[in-house]
Amino acid sequence: MSIFQGKKVLLGITAGIAAYKTASLVRLFIKSGAEVKVIMTPASKDFITPLTLSTLSKNPVHSTFYDKEDENEMWNNHVDLGLWADIMLIAPATANTLSKMTSGTCDNLLLATYLSAKCPVYFAPAMDLDMYKHPSTKTNLESLQTFGNIMIPATSGELASGLVGKGRMAEPEDIIDFISKDIASKLPLRGKKLLLTAGPTYEAIDPVRFIGNHSSGKMGFAIAKAAANNGAEVYLVSGPSSQTIQHSLIHRIDVTSAQEMYEACHNYYKDVDIAILSAAVADYKPKNIEIQKIKKKEASLVIELAPTKDILKSLGVAKKKQFLVGFALETNNEIENARKKIESKNLDVIILNSLKDKGAGFAGDTNKITIIDKDFNEKIFPLKSKVEVAKDIINEIISRINA
Ligand code: CTP
């Protein structure tokens, strides 16, 4: 999955010949799952039309605070645009705009939006070689970087003037690559390894039957995705689940029984920084697995059950550096039971689901959680989609491991 998936990208275009390449830039962002809005300086419209960019970005393109000729036109709120964006990219960034960005000049919509943006701002300079070399440009490029803006360096080659040298805007593919690497390098869980269990376990009775539960794996898979989107390398140990997942940072290890899940977890545990056990592990398994299919008889059938290993508890015992997170699914005395589990299983945090809460639990797409830490501080979250709950859980872990 692309790092731009679901990201809001605000592209500011200024009046350089490289503006013609921004059509490809918009296409590449859209193809990688981003939502794109474009702001142009008035002069940049001589190089590429707003119609091209609005068609490609599927959004209106703005270049003025309002359009005097259109009586239905609304004020284009630069503050809203600046706050909307997850990323702002100014490409091409001409010497003129770079100078205005440096001095805080605010005489067009693009510059006003730049000054209002709270997100990371990238800029890709483009100009002729002597303009690029000029001390004033050099000073502006340095100043902008000290403001925290991120420069995507110009490259060398033949310029529009026919001269050869440095000043070409980086190619659209290279701009995308630069930004995605920059984002990846700053993700809060980058370099961290995370073990995660998800789904149910099946405990065999005979070759065709098992004891299982209704866990879908949705919560665990959503956590895997949220963790990987934050840069963690995830070892997802999953019981039988129809969920699918595609992410370069997620390694899926399929298991069936509690014993297999136990072995897989211990295989990875010593190397991970964080472990989250969201699986609904069977607490009991048939003491003996029949080799042949059990035949139907008149008399009732008794299956003797033996306890499975408590994986979470065993990880609590083996814990060294790991931040250990358990789940508790309770029907009564929720807080008290969850607190007991924190202590008995040596957890850092427990995620409590109460079956009393409508919309919480196994099969659905929503969940309602309370996060309790080992000092028994409680954080109650409202009912949300499992995807949002997963983000809350990962954000909570990030804030705690970085505290
Ligand atoms: N868990 C586990 N191994 C087991 C059973 C549970 O790792 N054999 C983990 C679950 O993944 C969850 C936590 O333990 O993170 C709590 O599971 P839960 O079923 O709520 O609690 P139990 O400890 O099994 O206690 P009880 O069923 O009595 O509430």
Image: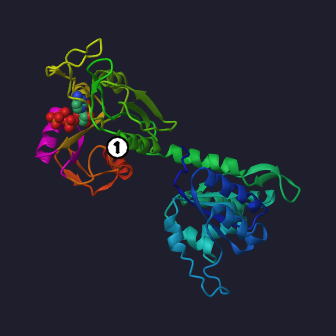
Q: Quadrant of ligand 1?
A: top left
**52 within the magenta span:** no
Mark 1 belongs to which amino acid?
Met
Q: Please state which of residues 321 and 389 is positioned toward the viewer in this rendering.
A: 389
What residue is rendered at 75% in x and 69% in y? 49
What residue is rendered at 66% in x and 50% in y? 175
- To which residue does mark 1 refer? 219
Q: Is residue 105 visible?
A: no
| Residue most extreme to the front | 298
Q: Please state which of residues 284 and 75 is positioned toward the viewer in this rendering.
A: 284
User: Counting other residues with Cα less than 10 Å from the Cα at mark 1, is it few (<14), some (14-19), or many (20 or more)?
Assistant: many
Part of the protein shown in magenta: 331-356
Q: Quadrant of the N terminus?
A: top right
In the image, residue 96 above or below residue 297: below
Q: Would you say 187 lies left or right of 163 here?
A: left
- What is the x, y in percent for residue 40? 67, 70
**345 within the magenta span:** yes
